[in-house]
Each structure stands twice: as C-alpha cells, then as structure tokens.
Image (cartoon, rainbow, N blue to C red):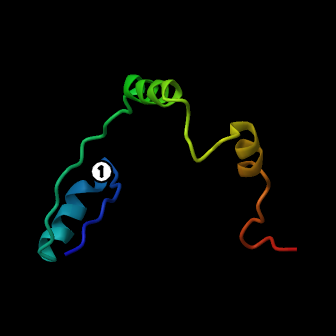
Amino acid sequence: MSQYLIDVPDEKIEEVASILETLNVKMAPVEERKPDIHKALDALRRIRDAGGIPSIPDPSAWQREIRKDKPLYGREE
C-alpha cells in the first residue's frame, strides 16, 4: 500500500472525496503544523554548545563550497 498527500482546494473536497470513495481509497485530513521555532533554536544552541558539527571543521569554507553556482537543469553550456 502507498500513501500520498495531496492539496485539494476546499471547494473541490466533496468532488475528490466522491472519486476516492468510488476507487475504495481511504481519505484522512492532515492538520497543518506550524514549525516550532523554539525547538529549532534549542537544537542549534545544543550543536553550538557541543562545539559544532565535527564533519565540518571550517564552517566558512563549507558555506563557500555549498553556495557555488551549480549548473541548472536544461541550461547546460
């Protein structure tokens, strides 16, 4: 069995529900959750307090490498 998440406009939900019922597909609403900024900040502070990420000895060099332009799909020279 596979699971999929699709965004359905509110005005189309009844139509989509009817189609899914015909196909014997279960439908369950998903509640949107806002990111918890305090949890994210706490995680970053713990990383900082532990001395950073060991696999990235020079964060500035790592950031420069990550930000290098990469070829865009369909725009090869």
- x, y percent for residue 8: 33, 55
Question: Is 19 placed left or right of 7 in the picture?
Answer: left
Question: Is 20 placed left or right of 7 in the picture?
Answer: left
- x, y percent for residue 67: 74, 48
Alpha-carbon neighbours of circle 1 within 10 Å: few (<14), some, or many (≥20)? few
Closest to the observer, 69 or 17: 69
Specify the farthest residue to the right: 77
Residue shown at 15%/71% (left/top)? Answer: 25
Question: Is 24 placed left or right of 5 in the picture?
Answer: left
Under circle 1, the secondary element is helix
Kind of residue indicated by mark 1: Glu
Vertically, is 70 above or below 39? below
Vertically, is 4 above or below 65? below
Vertically, is 66 above or below 77? above
Question: Is 13 placed left or right of 69 in the picture?
Answer: left
Vertically, is 5 above or below 54? below
Residue shown at 49%/31% (left/top)? Answer: 47
Residue shown at 37%/27% (left/top)? Answer: 39
Residue shown at 79%/55% (left/top)? Answer: 69
Question: What residue is disc 1 on?
Answer: 11
